[in-house]
Image (tube, rainbow, N blue to C red):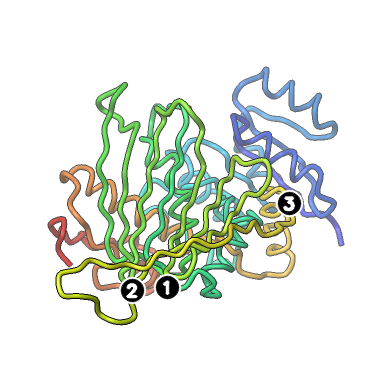
């Protein structure tokens, strides 16, 4: 079977990583890369012999030998480029977030499904073996009933000029939460601050409330002295911590917990039972998540399978981000996420692709 012809648009920070992975896949052939900066094009030609470069994305979209287009450009361009590629009959991998609004994301999903094309969103952590193991621990109830999840994605920079830190970093953590819990939140609220540039939030705290009284907190910042990539899952049986920056033992399971006494104590006496057990680090067979993602994209094209992080998954993340943005501008109000519709077809107006989005319900913080 011939390799899938791949074209890449954008070669800034993330683009070269995507090019390298597709270049090294036996099932893919990187045919062309579009990049505005001539010095970057020259570097690519030296690093990846045989790959043609161009200054315009139109050349990538017009090449009939290119079956799949990879978009690694600023968020504001995702919708336009992905739409052009899908309309040209090409499969699309677009970096997170899928688009800058629910309406744009919904239109891309509708277009890909109407034309039977693969639309994969770069939620890379869904392809991370450590996150897969964490999901297994949650879904198998090894940790028991989940009380809450806390995530932190912090570092100094990289500041973006057209989006805030929530749209830049939180898509990773939101996609992880949806993947771990396999459900959508009921509400979301967000508070933040623009410390360096008042017009752009550089630190944001999100709260997501899921069914079953599960709460998740997401902290993202461009203004931290230390790089932190951590997910803590607290269950009523055990607790687990995933530390992505750890060289080894990326997941640790703590046999710790607290419970009420089996029999009532003396009236007025406060008694709790604390458990301090072993700390275990399960063996995780490591694979580069981006390599797994790229290979999965090619496989989905060849087999017509639905991608793990498909367009619908990307739309769900954008929906939460858009609601959270509304919460930011309303002083941290808790905002309903679903608002009476549970899935994407309802948001699409029965699959029409018109991008209609209902207005969010604003609920005061603390309401149920």
Residue visible at 52% across and 44% down? 81
Q: Estimate the spatial distance between the alpha carbons at disc 1 and disc 2, rounded to whole Å.
A: 9 Å
Residue 65 as seen in the image, left or right of residue 82: right
Mark 1 touching mark 2, by CB under 8 A?
Answer: yes
x then y, percent, for residue 296: 69, 59
Residue 145: mark:
1
Residue visible at 50% across and 37% down? 228
**In the rendered view, would you say 186 is above or below 25?**
below
Residue visible at 16% across and 44% down? 331
**In the rendered view, would you say 46 is above or below 309?**
above
Say if residue 49 shows up in the picture. Answer: yes
Which residue, as the protein is rendered here, is positioned at the far top?
39
- Per the image, the residue denoted by label 3 is 287
Quadrant of res 302:
bottom right
Residue 226 as seen in the image, left or right of residue 37: left
Q: Residues within 10 Å of mark 2 (few under 14, many from 20)?
A: few
Q: SS of the residue at dot 3? A: loop
Q: SS of the residue at dot 1? A: loop
x then y, percent, for residue 165: 38, 36
Q: Residues within 10 Å of mark 1 (few under 14, many from 20)?
A: some
Residue visible at 28% across and 56% down? 188
Q: Quadrant of the C terminus?
A: bottom left
Nearest the viewer among 280 and 184 is 280
- Per the image, the residue denoted by label 2 is 212
Which one is closest to the eye, mark 1 or mark 3?
Answer: 1
Q: SS of the residue at dot 2? A: loop
> How many callouts does the rendering have?
3
Labels 1 and 2: the sequence-earlier one: 1
Which one is closest to the eye, mark 1 or mark 2?
Answer: 1
Nearest the viewer among 357 and 187 is 187
x then y, percent, for residue 83: 50, 51
Q: Estimate the spatial distance between the alpha carbons at disc 1 and disc 3, rounded to whole Å.
A: 29 Å
């Amino acid at each position: 079977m011939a390799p899938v012809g791949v074209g890449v648009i954008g070669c800034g920070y993330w683009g070269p990583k995507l090019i390298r992975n597709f270049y090294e896949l036996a099932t893919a052939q990187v045919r062309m890369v579009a990049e505005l900066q001539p010095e970057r094009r020259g570097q690519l030609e030296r690093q990846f012999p045989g790959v043609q470069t161009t200054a315009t994305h139109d050349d990538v979209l017009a090449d009939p030998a290119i079956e799949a287009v990879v978009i690694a450009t600023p968020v504001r361009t995702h919708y336009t480029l992905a739409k052009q590629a899908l309309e040209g009959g090409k499969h699309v991998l677009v970096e997170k977030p899928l688009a800058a609004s629910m309406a744009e994301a919904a239109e891309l999903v509708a277009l890909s499904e109407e034309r039977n094309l693969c639309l994969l969103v770069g939620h890379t952590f869904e392809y991370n073996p450590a996150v897969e193991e964490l999901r297994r621990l949650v879904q198998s109830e090894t940790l028991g009933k989940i009380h809450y999840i806390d995530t932190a994605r912090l570092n100094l920079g990289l500041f973006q000029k057209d989006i805030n830190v929530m749209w830049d970093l939180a898509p990773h953590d939101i996609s992880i939460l949806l993947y771990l819990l396999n459900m959508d939140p009921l509400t979301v609220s967000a508070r933040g601050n623009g410390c360096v540039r008042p017009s752009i939030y550089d630190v944001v705290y999100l709260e997501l409330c899921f069914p079953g009284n599960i709460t998740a907190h997401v902290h993202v910042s461009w203004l931290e002295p230390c790089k932190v990539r951590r997910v803590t899952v607290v269950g009523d049986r055990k607790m687990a911590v995933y530390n992505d920056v750890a060289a080894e033992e990326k997941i640790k399971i703590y046999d710790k917990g607290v419970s009420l006494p089996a029999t009532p104590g003396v009236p007025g006496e406060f008694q709790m039972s604390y458990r301090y057990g072993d700390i275990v680090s399960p063996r995780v067979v490591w694979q580069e998540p981006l390599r797994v993602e790229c290979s999965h994209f090619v496989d989905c094209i060849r087999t017509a399978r639905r991608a793990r992080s498909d367009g619908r998954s990307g739309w769900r993340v954008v929906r939460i981000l858009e609601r959270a943005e509304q919460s930011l501008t309303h002083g941290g109000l808790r905002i309903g996420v679903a608002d009476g519709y549970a899935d994407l077809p309802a948001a699409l107006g029965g699959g029409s692709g018109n991008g209609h989005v209902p207005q969010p319900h604003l609920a005061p913080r603390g309401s149920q």
